Image: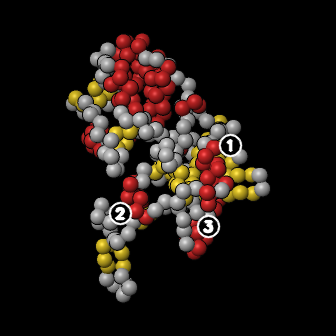
Amino acid sequence: MNPILWTKKADPAFLRLDLEPKAEKKIEELFDKAAEDFMEEVKQLIPFDAGYTVKEGECFEIDDFKIEEDLLAACDQPLTTQRVQASEVGSLELKAVVGYKQDGKSQTLLLQNFDGRRVLVPGRRFALTAMADTSTFQTLQRPVFVLDSKVSAIWMDGKLLFKSFHLAKQMVDLTKYFQAASDKQLESFAKHKLIECSDIEKFVDSNNFWTRKKVAMILASGYLDAVPPKELKGIAKNVEYDLVMNKGKVVMPEDPKEMQELLHFLDEELYVGYFSKKKFLTNSKRVR
């Protein structure tokens, strides 16, 4: 198996990671074992509900989940997919590594979350490798991919299975499976300990359907409860977003466009292009 790299960009959205024969066999074994472990732990399937947190032995399922046709095609005919070059590794913006299995007309995709911390690039991070004598180490000479031994989601002939909403939403679009946030949820968001809202009533009354869906996703993700204010400021700096904070709280802007930008940030949809240094929205090439 030569895994498919799922990028955050529209072109190319998918790349083939070519492996030498021994590595190809190992990676197939890794994905097979990861899928087996994933399913072994599942005792009950729960129809996806963004407001519910799965317990041990439970797993979310979404029937008739439309995965991207180009991804299905890349996994069905990997040799027709563009190869990734070693020189490109340092600039890749990946959201997932995809393993796949074919059994007649049945198709299974094994999705593993991926982020930049799992690519070791010479000069960017200080990494050491053993030399031939095994007792002396040298600095890394070539890029290194580090894959996990687990999968975050499994797609089987239209059914999507996942245990962590947080991880799944980084790979696939779950927006359509969300109900818009109610007035009570909007009020809860505006009153959160990490949020400073000058006029809660106005905020609740003025929000459209898009904003309500975004708020529902942010609340369901649990980011606001998990990330300390200082860390949030650092994350904003990394994606070059001008986050306004006051005494450890995120100040909600009154301007609708600025509010939209804040919600994109809180929903982890902003990133900076490696070469261009331009700021983009995930799953698009639209410059902010």
Helix, strand or loop at mark 3: helix
Above/below status of 101 relative to 227? below
Residue 6, visible in the rendered structure: yes
Point out the residue furthest to the bottom here: 133
Q: Which dot, 2 or 1, sits closer to the camera?
A: 2
Residue hosting label 1: 159
- Residue 230 drawn at (x, y percent): 26, 41
Q: From the image, which quarter does the N terminus lie in?
A: bottom right
Sort mark 2 into few (<14), some (14-19) or many (20+) by Cα contacts within 10 Å: many
Residue hosting label 2: 121
- Residue 20 drawn at (x, y percent): 55, 72
User: In this image, 36 relative to 251: left or right?
Assistant: right
- The quadrant holding residue 263 is top left
Residue hosting label 3: 29
Q: Nearer the viewer, residue 31 or 41?
A: 31
What amino acid is labelled 1 in the image?
Answer: Lys
What amino acid is labelled 3 in the image?
Answer: Glu
Q: CA distance from mark 2 to mark 1?
A: 36 Å
Q: From the image, which quarter does the C terminus lie in?
A: top left
Taking the spot 41% from the left edge, 13% from the top edge, the residue there is 206
- Residue 247 drawn at (x, y percent): 21, 30
